């Protein structure tokens, strides 16, 4: 499991720009959650999660496909035991992490007067992030796929 988590972490932090944006997103989210704890206004919490998504998770969806392709390409890696299964589990955990902020929004403070949004929204976000990941995976293999 350690190898899977290491690959999962690499999908978020492979590039220097990703690390910078991830740090900025964590500071932004932390500051706004602190504002939510001090004032009690849920707008702080929601803006914090949206900022974390925009600064850290959204760029990771685009970059992770290139990292996944680069890690999967060398023939030497394919000789490692359970290499493909570990890579697929890491990508699955990555997609779960992409959907986590939206899932937190679904379950946070729902009452009878404040019902949760439709579950289709979660399905749309999953579909769009999967399509972006697959498109970038194909694109980094051959640039002519950009017209797809």
Image (cartoon, rainbow, N blue to C red):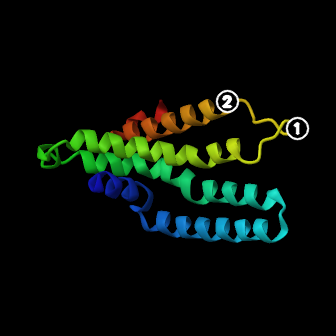
Q: Do tag 1 and tag 2 residues touch (Cβ < 8 Å)?
A: no
The percent position of residue 102, horizontal first and vertical second, equals: 64, 44
| Number of the front mark, 1 or 2 | 1
* SS for dot 1: loop
* Mark 1 to mark 2 CA distance (whole Å): 18 Å
Please report the residue visible at 38 percent of the width from the left and 53 percent of the height from the top: 8
* Residue 113, label in figure: 1
Q: Earlier in the sequence, mark 1 or mark 2?
A: 1
The percent position of residue 140, horizontal first and vertical second, equals: 37, 44
Is 116 on the left or on the right of 148, as rendered?
Answer: right
Q: Quadrant of residue 53?
A: bottom right
* SS for dot 2: loop
* Residue 119, label in figure: 2
The percent position of residue 127, horizontal first and vertical second, equals: 55, 31
**Residue 45 or 138: which is nearer the viewer?**
45
**Residue 19 or 103: which is nearer the viewer?**
103
Vertical arrangement, residue 48 with respect to residue 100, above or below: below
Q: Residues within 10 Å of mark 2 (few under 14, many from 20)?
A: few
Vertical arrangement, residue 142 with respect to residue 52, above or below: above
Please report the residue visible at 60 percent of the width from the left and 36 percent of the height from the top: 125
Please report the residue visible at 48 percent of the width from the left and 63 percent of the height from the top: 18
Vertical arrangement, residue 102 with respect to residue 34, above or below: above
């Amino acid at each position: 499991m350690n190898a899977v988590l290491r690959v999962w972490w690499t999908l978020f932090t492979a590039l220097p720009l990703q690390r910078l944006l991830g740090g900025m997103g964590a500071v932004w989210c932390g500051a706004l959650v602190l504002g939510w704890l001090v004032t009690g206004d849920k707008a702080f919490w929601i803006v914090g999660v949206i900022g974390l998504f925009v600064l850290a998770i959204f760029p990771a969806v685009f970059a992770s496909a290139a990292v996944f392709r680069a890690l999967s390409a060398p023939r030497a890696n394919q000789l490692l035991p359970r290499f493909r299964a570990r890579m697929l589990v890491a990508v699955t955990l990555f997609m779960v992490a992409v959907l986590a902020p939206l899932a937190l929004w679904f379950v946070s403070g729902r009452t009878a007067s404040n019902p949760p949004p439709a579950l289709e929204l979660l399905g749309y976000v999953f579909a769009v992030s999967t399509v972006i990941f697959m498109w970038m995976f194909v694109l980094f293999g051959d640039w002519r796929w950009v017209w797809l």
